[in-house]
Amino acid sequence: MKKLLALILVLAMTLSLAGCGTSGSGQSSSKTLNIGVFEPASGDNGAGGKQETLGIEYANSVTPTVQINGQTYNVALKIVDNQSATDKAPTAAQQLVSDGVSVVLGSYGSGVSMAAAPIFQQAKIPAIGASCTNPAVTQNRPYYFRVCFIDPFQGSVMANFVKDQFNAKKAYVLNMLGEDYGSGLATYFANAFKQLGGTVKSEEFPEGTSDFSAYIQNAINYGADVIFAPSATTYASLIISQAASAGCKIPLAGGDTWESSVILDAQKGTNLQVYVSTFFDENDKSGAAAAFVTGFKAWLNANPQRKTDNGGNDIVAAVSALGYDAYMTAIEAIKIANSTTGEDVRNAMSKVSFDGVTGHISFPNGGDADKNEAFIKQADNGVFKFIKRQSSKS
Amino acid sequence: MTKILPYLLGGISVGGQYALIAIGYTMVYGILRLINFAHGDIFTAAGFFMVYAAASLPLYLSIPLVILLTILMGVLVERAAYKPLRSAPRMSVMISAIGMSYLLENVMWYITGGLAKRYPVIPWISDSVTILGCTTKRVTIITPILTVILVIGLVILIQKTKIGMAMRAASRDFETARLMGIKIDSVISFTFVVGSALAAVGSMLYFSNYATVTPVVGVMPGLKAFVAAVFGGIGSIPGAVLGGFIIGISETLTKGAGLTTFSDAVTFALLIIILIVKPTGLFGEKPTQKV
């Protein structure tokens, strides 16, 4: 009996290996261009990563082919899960390299992007981040690009906003211990806020925290005018609902990760003021955005699994829009390069210039797209209300 | 005092929830000498059951249904992952438990899509109340009281009933109990029934306070509850409860003192000190030498 089982297992393994072999050789002979999708589908950022991947998949369904040297190439997406973990990210990146991708898109989360950067650089494959906002992602990394604005900008936008809106003098800043995105953004906010003449109390919570009542109490005792808590949505929704049940009336503000249906659900039915800064506004009727929103909603509603991955509704997240723009940027660069080689695509990036759904995209100074405004929104009983466009100067 | 009170209230409430999960760990350990790593995930699953049940059923139906489903799940986990390994080395069962925990987490990722779900509001216990000038939810006050009532009930069950006697016999000596005609499988199933039911109640109290359910939300409370069980002396139910409260309170007080970065470190340092002074935990039995 045991021998039979072992035999079956061995057979299953060899068969699956043989399967790999045939599919691999099939791809190299047909005209297919591979684009890697390096995003988390599990871990703390799994939910956001899925929304970004949805944007990329939608873009792929809109523009499934690209012309290179007069020949039509089908664009195939190679999707890997970096599990939101910096120790797992290099393996996932290596997987994409061995799949022979021409360009990589992602990731949601700056830490995993940085962890994978050396691998892409060594393989001479350009990577285009969608929403990784930590400035270190593209610093001294000639193969990393991104289509979003960066954290020092976002931090000073939020500092200016709370100063303008609430005349805030004391800010309580809370982020997760050892998380690249949150601690970076918290520091930039704190620096900008101090430059505007305010005072800051910064605290950190360990991974896996679910009781935030003590932190809320610390903020109240400090007499804060605003709580700035850039963090993953899992923690953010706990912070918001516990602030509400502790009777806290201090306005809360977060970064781009907070623009999620999870935050809307947490704020619903409370009187808390919750503000987010983000890349994109669903109700923006200008240019490419309107067509994108209509098309993306229809695409989401056509398939129940996509809707589940988007959080069970058809609200368009900013990261989906950025994922779409990252894909379109890659296609533009491939067209200009007129080649499938990673090196050529990288060299073509500086010539890319087009209007994406999150604004104009071009790369005049290295790896960061040239963006100068953020959208401020307020979570208000189930919807994000557009407040204003905010630049980093008040 | 008014400064400390909110922290103390929070600590007691967190501690009560740790205690309810810790009982599940300690009971299974007492009988099977197995650390059921999947217990934290059963707690999470109870949260999801409630999210989906309350979406289509009224609360007076969904609450018993959730408890029933959680019990069923606990027993199924035991039947599928632990019973076939009853005569295997203890290490194999532990690996099986770790595997079960990851399996449950990933199944929940797959089904829910990973975005945090809102826990339904259970009326009355979710209302805000003001005690000595600080606002909190009513569930904060109810949790420790309910925990103590449930534990007293459990102790009576173990000390006074026939099945309780069988459980005590099994925990003292597995083989002899079997020789005396105790149906060991049904005793073990019953242990999982009680443990899972308490996890279901614990999850209702927990998520009424922290209303966000994600597939990995049970991991950290599960770990802390396990620490609480060790703290109080693993195998001892009053020990698990006391351990839960001590850990919950020390955690929030550390945060209140401004040492937010070290809140977990202080808790675990406390555990190490207790274990150095009293290696079997607060209420732990001395290991008896079998001849």
Image (spheres, coloured by chain):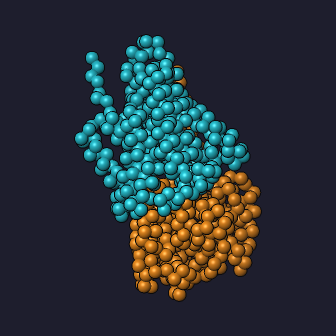
Chain colours: A orange, B cyan
Residue A393 visible (yes or no): yes
Where B144 falls versus A300 (above or below)? Answer: above
Residue A325, position in %: x, y? Answer: 62, 71
Residue farthest to the left?
B277
Residue A328: quadrant of the picture: bottom right
Left or right: B267, with A185 as reference point: left
x and y percent of residue B92 in the render? 41, 31
Q: Residue at x 46, y 20 (%)?
A: B166
Residue A257: % across, % down: 55, 66
The residue positioned farthest toward the front in the image shown? B132
Quarter of the image for residue A270 reads: bottom right
- The structure residue drawn at horizontal position 72% and vertical position 78%, both measured from the top left corner, is A285
- Front-most of A9 and A167? A167
Question: Is residue A23 positioned above or below A2 on the image?
Answer: below
Note whether residue A3 is visible: no
B203, B154: nearer the viewer: B154
- Where residue B242 appears, as percent x and y from the top left, is 38, 41
Q: Which residue is farthest bottom? A: A394
Q: Is A262 located above or below residue A138 in the figure?
A: above
Q: Which residue sits at x=52%, y=37%?
A: B198
Compare residues A177 and B192 and report the one nearer the observer.
B192
What residue lies at 65% left-to-right and 38% top-to-bottom?
A: B65
Residue nearer the viewer, A177 or A367: A177
